[in-house]
Image: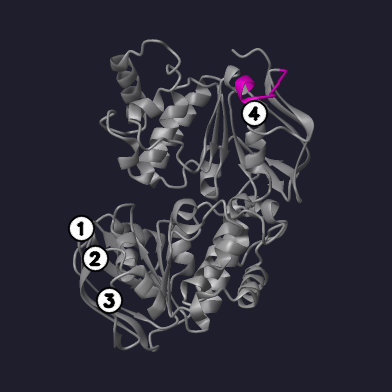
Amino acid sequence: MKKSEDAIEFTNISKRYPGVKALSDISFSIKWGTILGLAGENGSGKSTLLKLLTGIEKASEGEVQVEKEAITSIKTARRKKIAMVTQEPSLVDELSIAENVIVNESGKWFVNWKEKEKKTSFYLNKLGLDLDVKQKAGKLSPDQQQLVSIAKALATEPTILLLDEATSSLTDDQTELVFELLQDFKKNNNIVIFISHKLKEYLKICDEIIVLRDSHYITRLVPPHWTEETIISSMVGRELSDLYPLKKQVQHANIMLSIKELEIKKSANKTLDIDIRKGEIFVFSGLVGCGRSEILRALIGEMESDGHIDLAGKAYPCQSPVEALKRGITLIPAERKSEGIIGHLSVYENAVLGVRSRKSLFGLVNRKKEEKVVEKIIKDLGVKTASVHTHIEHLSGGNQQKVILGRALSISPQVLLLDEPTRGIDVGAKSEIYHLLRKLSDEGLTVIISSSDLQEVVGVADRVGVMFRGELKTILSNHEVTEENIMYYATGND
């Protein structure tokens, strides 16, 4: 048994960054043998609290203690056996899986590689992974990389495990396996601090939930006095009954995108035939690896394909993303940090990449035009940033996504493609994006989404194309769009 009941204590914690107050006088404690959820919108201070607990950051005021010892550095946190897994896998691509997972032996003169590989396999098996531990981590899929990152944290044999959006890229089955492991971890009188933007996950795994809002402590929720609605209202400070906008009927609208016998090369996808209408929000749904993302990438010419596509009644022989952009089709990718933003550049520089992709006169930058574009993006999409010169990597996930979305809209596309558009985004920002997409569709923009979030699919889609192993199994519309129907076809039923 651990010595003290209150293992972790946050006492009058405040944290300031230039132009931003991330935490304001926060105090609470956590007992051993607890899975605690930290809930709140992006920018509420959740991740900052975890960084203080790991010693990565230091509080401007107040103190973080574990078993009455102040956490003052990364070294202190490691001695207290604290490990963290973030949304982005913390792996070195060029190293093997084993070299990534077992890093605590690197300071020894002699490394027992067989023992290292055996230990790695042990932790991978706990997470349902059967991989060659000698292969390079960079060759793994995003969900495999995330599971390996969790294995890496577990291999340090922590007593306090922090999961910051660590399940965002996992399938439901993978998440379920992680949850079983966390329950076993808790039974050994350890602590888990869990952050997610999937509210159902909080209710399923957590013993209690601390809610933060605008850098302040709001409340501690415990069962049975919690629901998704109580969590949401605590997070945003109001009832969010209109999370999803009203849908519309589009069956009489003109066809914007007509796809016939589309065959995507170097993929397992089967031939695709589909018509998508002007002003429609059409969602491709299905389990991870079903081929939905490949369709979007083929439509911008990133993946080579055969077949025939008409865009607004004209042939669309797209050969590259640049060509797609010129013809009015743009994609917002799923991997926001690696493909959507350039983290070390400012909000301004990221926002104007769209208009700069259109050739200007003599290649000159029209600064006045760019400033108007950036001003419009920040105003229309409600981007929260201290300055347009702030590095975009310092913005919350929701605000980063708003900048990316604004950049895509700045070229006035005919078709907007979005792959997992709200992954890692809080419920308030999700609602804003859903309503914006509906407003754009009402104005005639065709929106095509690839999503694994069933609640999102049901909430936003006018029609749903359900994929299974590269095949479009069916198209659902109106009252047919339910989670049960989507899962029925997504698992291969006819």
The answer to whether the residue labelled 1 contacts the one labelled 3, judged by CB atoms less than 8 Å apart, is no
Magenta stretch in the rendered image: 68-76
- The reply, left or right, for residue 244 in relation to residue 256 is right
In the rendered structure, which disc, 1 or 2, sits on the residue that comes first in sequence? 1
For residue 236, what is the image quadrant?
Answer: bottom right
Q: Along the line of sight, which residue is nearer the eye, 314 or 111?
A: 111
**Of helix, strand and loop, which one carries label 4?**
loop
Q: Which residue is mark 4?
A: 55
Q: Residue at x 23, y 60 (%)?
A: 470
- The reply, left or right, for residue 287 in relation to residue 221 is left
Q: CA distance from mark 1 to mark 3?
A: 21 Å
Disc 4 residue type (three-letter): Gly
Disc 2 residue type (three-letter): Glu
In the rendered structure, which disc, 4 or 3, sits on the residue that comes first in sequence? 4
Image position, residue 135 (x, y; %)? 27, 33
Q: Quadrant where the N terminus lies?
A: top right
Q: Which residue, as the protein is rendered here, is positioned at the far front?
A: 362
For residue 352, what is the image quadrant?
Answer: bottom right
Q: Is residue 72 magenta?
A: yes
Q: Which residue is mark 1?
A: 266
Q: CA distance from mark 4 to mark 1?
A: 45 Å
In the rendered structure, which disc, 1 or 3, sits on the residue that comes first in sequence? 1
The answer to whether the residue labelled 1 contacts the one labelled 2, judged by CB atoms less than 8 Å apart, is yes
Q: Which residue is mark 3?
A: 274
Q: Which residue is mark 2?
A: 304
In the rendered structure, which disc, 2 or 4, sits on the residue that comes first in sequence? 4
The answer to whether the residue labelled 3 contacts the one labelled 2, judged by CB atoms less than 8 Å apart, is no
